[in-house]
Amino acid sequence: MPTRTARTAWDGGLQDGSGQVELTSSGLGTFEVSFPQRASEDGGGVTNPEELIGAAHSACYAMSLAGQLDARNATPQSMKIRAEVTLGPDPEGGFKLTGITLHVRGEVDGIDEAGFLEAAEAAKIGCPVSKALAGVDITLDAALETA
């Protein structure tokens, strides 16, 4: 299996510094980061590690769920996954990820609500990014929708 890379160039201290995250494997872009903007409610127009983790987790989870549905002979028509990643204080000092919620809505042929929820939970457990984030409380909000 392939190895993917990203890099960050950082200048300055925590409060006065800033950096750029580059998606080097794909070459798809370079994104600004800074701690003060990371800690702000609106994000200040730059990305942050939590948003990047959310992007990775939602994409990985979508693939995992598609595989679970395929194994059940169900046909996804549309799936929307949103990952909410929360940063908070760590009782041992500093900060930590305090939770991730995966919100999943799917239009899927050939499966009922119970089967979809079973597939959604199995996808959460089997998703490689979920496994990597095993130290974080990951909750699932899944629902089957009709067209």
Image (tube, grey):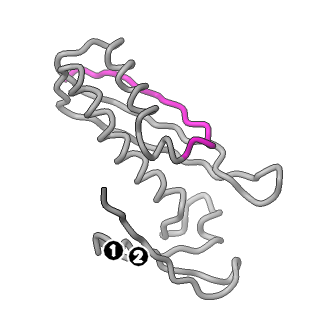
Q: Tell me where residue 35 sits by quadrant.
A: bottom right
Q: Mark 1 falls on what kind of element?
A: strand
Farthest residue in the front direction? 1
**How crowded is the residue under tag 1: few (<14 C-alpha within 10 Å), some, or many (20+)?**
few
Q: Is residue 107 above or below residue 32?
A: above
Mark pair 2, 1: CA separation = 6 Å
Which part of the image, by quadrant, shows the C terminus?
Answer: top left
Query: Is residue 68 shown left or right of residue 50?
Result: left
The residue where tag 2 is placed is 22
Sequence order check: which comes first, mark 2 or mark 1?
2
Confirm whether the magenta stretch covers residue 142: yes
Q: Residue at x 53, y 80 (%)?
A: 19
Q: Is residue 90 above or below residue 147?
A: below
Residue 105: where, in percent of width, then height? 34, 30
The number of numbered discs placed on residues in the rendered structure image is 2
Q: Residue at x 60, y 69 (%)?
A: 37
| Residue in the foreground of this view, choosing between 128 and 37 | 128
Contact between labelled residues 1 and 2, with CB atoms less than 8 Å apart: yes
Q: Please tell me the numbered disc located at residue 29.
A: 1
Q: Tell me where residue 27 sits by quadrant.
A: bottom left
Q: Please tell me the numbered disc located at residue 142.
A: none
Residue 81: where, in percent of width, then height? 36, 39
Query: Is residue 125 shown left or right of residue 26?
Result: right
Confirm whether the magenta stretch covers residue 117: no
| Residue in the foreground of this view, choosing between 93 and 142 | 93
Residue 146: where, in percent of width, then height? 23, 20
Q: Is residue 46 above or below residue 135?
A: below
Which amino acid lies under the numbered mark 2 shown in the image of this protein? Glu
Which amino acid lies under the numbered mark 1 shown in the image of this protein? Gly
Q: Mark 2 falls on what kind of element?
A: strand
Q: Residue at x 45, y 46 (%)?
A: 129
Image: magenta residue range: 133-147
